[in-house]
Structures are given as structure tokens and as C-alpha cells.
Amino acid sequence: MSQGHPELAEKFIANDERMHWHDKALWFVRAKRDNASKGVAEWEDLRDCAAKIKMHTIDHLDSYLLEFEKNALAKGIHIHWAYDAQEHNEIVLKLLQEKKVQKLVKSKSMLTEECHLNPYLEAAGIEVVDTDLGERIVQFRKEPPSHIVLPAIHLKKEDVGTTFEEFLHTQKGNSDPTYLTRAARVHLREKFLNADAAMTGVNFGIAETGGFVVCTNEGNADLGAGLPKLHIASMGIEKIIPKLSDLAIFTRLLARSATGQPVTSYTSHYHAPVVGGELHVIIVDNGRSDIIKDKDFRQSLQCIRCGACINTCPVYRRSGGYSYGYTIPGPIGSTLGANRNISLYKTLPFACSLCGSCSNVCPVKIDLDQQLYKHRQTVVAQNLLGFKKHTILKVATWVMKHPKILDFSGKMARAIVPKLPRSIVYSKANLWGKQRELPPFPKQSFKEAYQAKKGDRK
Amino acid sequence: MRIGLFIPCFMNELYPEASMDTLRILEHLGLDVEYPFEQTCCGQPMANTGCAKEASVLAYRFLEIFKKYDYIVAPSGSCVSMVRQNYAQFLEGKDGFEHLRTHTYELVEFLHDIIKPDNLHVKFPFKVGIHNSCHAHRHLRLASMSERNEAPFSKIKALLEKAEGIEFVELTRVDECCGFGGTFCVSEEAMSVAMGKDRVQDHLKAGVQIITGVDMSCLMHMQGIIDRDKLPIKTMYVGQILAGGIV
């Protein structure tokens, strides 16, 4: 990442009108989520329960994964294990090539984004069509999703209109959402009907049954997986839940947290291949088992990818998904990215005011703000903070160990700074003063006033 | 009951009046308050920037200075949150730490939970917007969170309500961060200011005259924006309102 989050955020903020539009669009989703969650009396109990189930599952992940595999195999589902993204992509390509697949339809899967599957398959001559409307829009534009649930949230309807003019030959200047949606539907129906294979993600893999569940609002997972004879589902190892009866807890939380809906329009259960077809599940690690080992960060594997932390994040809402430079933006992306490569993503733990809103909207109670706080210590421990910043804080600490030196420095500053010309006080080095005034410097410190007061009494 | 008064380092240097009002409130209630002179900083700026080694030194210092008091009271939600939430990493198991962690209070919280004064003898006939600063709000739980499904409450409001003539103004976003965030205010300068401007605007549009809160740092940030942009609104530390009746 050539530029860090502060620089990319500054660029996003520079367009004040668009930044505020983005902030309001996401705040609207957050407000819907608040309403929906307040309609469920036992909401906080559900969160507790979901967090405990997830933590229990992660504590016993090996046995639940093996149980899932055993039960899936018994249902005629093929299971593959991928150590990393490369292995995952190779498995997918091999399966597609065995069936001579040329056209693949894919419903939303952040895991395949994480593995950069699309360019890998396209390089092998396979047409990959993302069938989620938002994802199709960004795919046309050769952009990655800017949000995990709302991939095209950074675009206005006019942007979609011009994109469709170019790729779907819609009427020039027509950005009516219904018109554009119909155009997309016609386009996607043709892709669904001619696909040789389908891929989906997995929201929940159920150990007890060996089946899995995919949640969508557009029904595109079903349209994709129902027609071709080959369905490949990519699942991160953390997507397992122990029992079918656990599922309701998560489906009640997921859609409400994500968009404020009581439930996604489609909650599709896959428990067997289509008649005469094949169903493959690729279970992917790609760094997850390293996170399990780390007690400070293992809770991040509880994530059900609802995006609530992203919607509530005051930083994300004002900097957009691309300012993070990682597949997943916002608080959850910042902790996952920092876990993946602290050097590359060293600014992400600091792209946060530590407000803590994320940890409190999270339906599985991940301690997101605490994780970002702790990642900062890793940044420092690996000498990635930057010499200047680190030195300033080291010097400040030294001063704070010596109250007399602190008192003297304060006295000097209060005597000198008010006499300095504005051009010096508000020089370029004063980042505070770029857009903010400093408070007026008082004549004496509290300590001086306190000493004077106590002296008076004596 | 012996109280150790902790004044955050920047408040000691920049806000002697707000700090003095904190002391006056406590003394006016007849409490035995002492301000230990060797105190400096709780280590929050270091800790929030990831400098654990430096933060640990200051945490240990803080413990040594304050562990002898029955209660430690500070006019800052975030410094208190540093002690309660983040000191454990450095001080767990150390002599006096458990007492320190459970007996360090933010001023409003201390008044509301421990002292429970009946009357403040304060008149404050202004339209007030409460800034729920994040660490006081979500770590110390000074008020119900908009994120949670919980019964509404606010310790700040409960206390300020005792002021005669005060009028609370409802905001569109009741507990959104102002963007101060400690060193965040300079490391993410553009973001910090954008967040601060939005927060001030919410108060302005709602007709607020005085923005108040328990963290002077957030107020300093917003006042900095207000002064630069010459906006018709003011910030005031909550202790300055509460001390209004003391003569």
C-alpha cells in the first residue's frame, strides 16, 4: 500500500458533498439496524448466546470440521481442504477444468475476494460473472467491493447509470433504479441460463448435518447453483456452527445487524448436489488458524460478516472502503488485515478513534476496538510506528516521569507561546492548528493555582 | 474518606479553571481531597499509540502515587477508562492495583454513584447538548448506548437535571464520536476534523447553546473547530456547570 489510511481518507474527505452523502447512506443502514434490533426484546441475550456458540466452536474447531466433513461426505458432498489462497484457487480451477467449464456464475463470497480468485480464473480463460447486483456493478468497473454487504455503496445511482450505459447499453442519462435493475436482471438471466458451473460462499456450515446455508437478498445464489451440474462453495474454517438448532440464533442476528431486515430474502440450505450434478465444498484456512492461536485476536474469527461494525464506524463512513486498502474494510477488516500483514497494513489499527461503537453493534460481540488498540502495540514492537512519532512519545514519557521538568516546560510554554506571532504558532508543523484553534494559554497551571490556594489557607 | 484528585496532564496545563471547579465541587461536598503534586500523566497517549513500554512506566507511577487513597477522582472519562480498562495489562497482580482499578472514578460518575447529592443549588438557564464522549460512554457506561437494546439512562443528565432552568436538546446522533481520539487528532488530522465538524453541526442545528461533557479533550477539539470557523456555540466542561452554585 503506497499510501496509508490517513492520506486516502483525506482524499475522500476532500469531496465534502460526496463524503457526507456516503456517511448519511451508511448511517441510514445503521439506524435501520438499531430499529430492527430494538424490536427483539431478547436482542442482547441473542448476542451473548451467539458469541458463546462461536467461541465454543472455535475452541473445538478441529472436531467440528471433521464432523462436518464426515456428514457432508455421507450426503454425497465432496470436501476439499485448502491451506491458503493459492491452494484454494488451484482446487477451483482444477474442478472447473475437469468439467470443461468456460462460464462460471458466482454469488457473493468475500472469501473468493480474499483469495483473488476472479483474476486467477480469468487468466485461465474462464468467464467469471459476479451475480450479486452490487458486485456485478463493481465488476464492470474493475473495482473491488467497497463494503462486504453493500459492495457498490460508494456509487450513486448516476454512477451505476453511466456504467450500465457502457456495459449493458442502457439509455443515456437514465439512472432510474427500477429501469437499471431490470436491465441488470435481463443481463444476469442470460448469464444464469448459460453458466456451466456456479460458485457460492458459505454463511454457515452445520457440523451436525454436513450441509451449509447461504443468505442472499437477490436469490442469486439459488439461481446460480440450481441450474448447472457443478456447484463449488468456498468456506472459511470459522464458518462452522455445531448444530442446526444453533442456526436460528444467527439468522435472527445476521440480517437485522446487516441491513435492519428481520431476515434475508433467501436463506438457502444446501444438503446435497442437484440431481445428476456435483457439489464441492472447499474448506479454507488461509491464515485463520494462526489467529486462533492468538488469544488477543481469536475473537475476530467469530465474525459472521454482517458489516454492522462497518456501517457504524464514524471513520469508515467518512473515508470509504478503498481507504483501507484491504479486502475487508472498517473495524473488522482493520483487525483481520493487521493480523495478515502488520507491515503492509500498519496504518489500519490507527484508522480508528477507539470510540467502541463497533464492539457494541457486533452481533457476536467481537472486542474490535480492543483488538485495534492491541494491534498498535504490535506496530510499535515491530518498529513500524515511524521514528518521529515514537521519539516524541518517548520524550513525552521521560518528561512525565519528572514532574519538575513538566512544570517548568508548561510554565515556559504558557509564557512564550502567547507572545509568538501566529505564523510561527500555526506553522505547518502544527497539525492540530491546520483546521483548529489552540485553546488560549492560561496564566498559571492548575498546580500553581492549587499551591497558591493552599498557601492562602495556611 | 480520603480522595486523591487526578487532574489530566493537559488540563493541568491548559484548563486550570475547569480543574479548580472539580476540586471546588468535591470540597464543597465536605470531602477530604488531596492533590498529590508528583502526579503527571496516566499514560493514555502512549498506550493509545501502541507504546506499551512507555505506558507501563506511567501506569506504575500512577499506581504508586494514588493507591493510598480511598477513592481517586478525575475530571476525565478517558483517563479513568485508561486506569480501569487498560492498566491491567501492565499492573495485574501488583499490590494495590485491584483497589485502584475499582476505586478510580470520573467526576460525574463519582457524584452520581457514590455521593448522590440532592441539590446542586445551580442555575443554568441555557439550551444544553450533551457530548457523550466515547470512553466515558461505552467503557464507563455513563449513559445507555444507541447501539444496545437497553433501557435509556444518563448519569450526566441525571446530575445536570438538578440545575435550575437547564434545557436539554435532542441530537440526531446521540453518541457519535467527535473524532478527537487522542493522538488520532493529529495522525488522522483530516478525519478527526471532519468528524468534529459534523458533531458540532449536529449541536448547532438542534439549537444548542452550550455543548457540555465529561471530557475536556473532546471539548477542546470541538472548541478549536468552533473558534476557527467562528460558530455561534460554546463548549463548557460539565464540572463548570455543576460548580456554578458554589460561592
Image (cartoon, coloured by chain):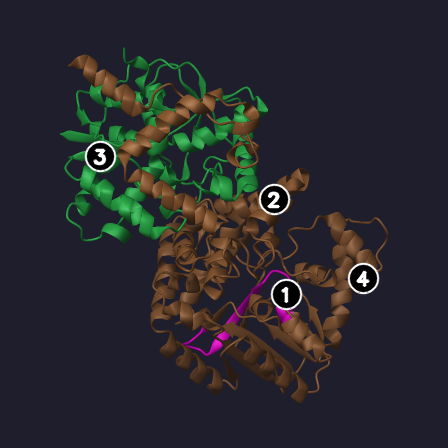
Labels 2 and 1: the sequence-earlier one: 2
Q: Nearer the viewer, residue A426 or A249?
A: A426
Q: Chain of mark 2?
A: A
The residue indicated by pointer 1 is A219
Q: Colour of chain B?
A: green
Please tell me whether mark 1 sits on a helix, a strand or a loop: loop
Give the magenta range: A206-222
Quadrant of the rendered structure where residue A223 is? bottom right
Residue A396 percent location from the top left of the image: 37, 41
**Res B139 visible:** no
Identify the amino acid type marked 3: Ile
The quarter in which the C terminus of chain A is drawn is top left
Residue count near mark 1 (Cα–Cα under 10 Å), binned few <14, some 14–19, many ≥20: some
Residue count near mark 4 (Cα–Cα under 10 Å), binned few <14, some 14–19, many ≥20: few
Identify the amino acid type marked 1: Gly
Quadrant of the rendered structure where residue B2 is? top left
Q: Give the distance between the C-alpha atoms of the residues marked 3 and 4, in whole angstroms.
A: 66 Å
Apparent side of residue B59 relative to residue A361 in the rendered image (left or right)? left
